[in-house]
Image (spheres, rainbow, N blue to C red):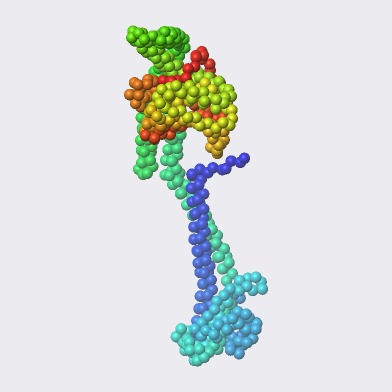
Amino acid sequence: MSKSVRLTLANKCLLLFGAAVILILAAALIVVALRMQTLVDEGPRKRARDYADAWLTNKIQLGPTLSAYQLQSRSENLPADENLKFVRIDRSEFSAAEEEDPFLKTTIEKFQLRPDQTERFTHAIDPGGQTYYRYARAVRKSELNTIRGGTAAGFSATIDTTGLANPLEEILLIDLRDPDAPIEQAVNIIYLIAAGIAAGLLAIFVFWYITTRIILSPVRLLRDYAAAVSEGNLNIRSDINTGDEYEQLSDMFNHMLDNIRKNTQDLRSINKSLDLKLGELAESNVALYEANKIKGEFLANVSHELRTPLNSISGFAEVLAETFTDTHDPADEKRRRYVNNINKSSRTLLDLINDLLDLAKIEAGRMELSLSQISITDTTEGLLNLMRPQAEKADITLQLDVPPNLPIITTDAGKLQQILFNFLSNAVKFTPADGTVTLSARFLTPHEDNQRPELRISVTDTGPGIAPEDQQRIFDKFTQLDPSVTKQFGGTGLGLTISKELADLLQGRIELESEVSAGTTFSLVIPTEPIAKTAPLMPDFAETPDTSS
């Protein structure tokens, strides 16, 4: 691959200016050459006109009329000269002249058609190849009478342009040969070419000197300064004292360097501060990592110690409650109430611990997926049966809207049930008496944005609904929209947060549709065949569905 030739600024200026000088000089020399040729031709014309005027004013006497086409050198009162031929052609010889000489034919026609035309002048080449000049002068009747009468009157005083009143009588033909004319022309051309070349070279030299010394020299200095700056030398300064725009450009260049140097120093100071901040952040990150590691280890270590006593307390409280079931002693009734409070409080604590452990596992990325094939119909029926006692206690009707022909899907059954149980628990908790909670499931048709088949499982209630400004906030940690409900039913505000994280883990999403006083619909959309992913394992804990949010 050939590289393109790169011209410097000096070369470009010289080429362009040189071409312009050559064109201008060529045009000027052509005009001068044409004018010089005109001047060279004007000499023989003037000589021929002088001869003609001398004859017309009787200063020259010619003999009898010459035969026009023998072109014999014959004149009176003039020395014989081979470079001059003087011929008079009278009116009777016009026809013969027109047949023999094309120049005379054209001349006679012009003189006869235009009485105001008195002369013609042209170049001609003889058989020997030499150039000579031909001059024809019209002699009309009034002029011929003047010549015969011997009156010395000029041509301009005797001309009569009345046409037929002053007919053409004779033509005076003068042939001049000037052997020095070609030499003069050649010399003139040589002088012109030499002058043009000298002027062009001088102009190019002057322009080169001006371009190099005045224009390009400061530019090259600035280029050298810029090259030094590009190599990292910010201490260099431009020193150009031309008193024009280049000096202004040099001052601006120095000002720019001062700003760059100042900004560089500022950036170095900022970088040092950032390095210190980064070191502090790194130490903080290490401390946070250690704290998070200690937290995880703490949760893993104390979970068994926390759950085992709580399960024991809850179990023994249930046993004690059964011993007071068939007695009617007021003291036993009081003891049974105390035992129920113990059982309720222990289960609340157990649910809180389960939520915190699940959230810690999800945030640490240690939640494991256990994929298996499940039946949506069986899963939804089991969840409704689990929630039915709580719903009947609150006078809420549970409905199931699941087609019987739904195919088997592959997902994590435990996490799916935990999400749906949280939806149902919240729906029963916030739906007033005589309300309805509906659990439904539908397959979604694949579309352009998502080609995977998906399943939508929805829980719809007839509760108070959720305001639009709160629909994103309810997924935040420890968020409760109505504190009075929390005091009445309990809950940690982690249920929906964990459900959202579990939905992401199942490669699905949670959708919310709600209007104030019009109920709420929570939907879980999951793929029927998720992409299997493995996660780091954490010590296994007993999974308990979230019933506290």
Can residue 168 be seen here? yes
Residue lying furthest right: 127
Name the residue located 51 percent from the left edge and 53 percent from the top edge: 19
Coordinates of residue 458 in the picture (x, y in percent): 48, 31
Q: Is residue 483 left or right of residue 144?
A: left
Can residue 289 be seen here? no
Q: Quadrant of residue 406?
A: top right
Name the residue located 40 percent from the left edge and 30 percent from the top edge: 435
Q: Quadrant of residue 268?
A: top left
Vertical placement of 225 versus 23: above or below?
above
Vertical placement of 98 versus 214: above or below?
below
Name the residue located 57 percent from the left edge and 27 percent from the top edge: 409
Quick one: 429 or 256, which is closer to the camera?
429
Quick one: 53 or 390, which is closer to the camera?
390
Coordinates of residue 29 in the picture (x, y in percent): 51, 61
Vertical placement of 361 versus 25: above or below?
above
Coordinates of residue 413 in the picture (x, y in percent): 54, 22
Quick one: 270 or 139, which is closer to the camera?
270
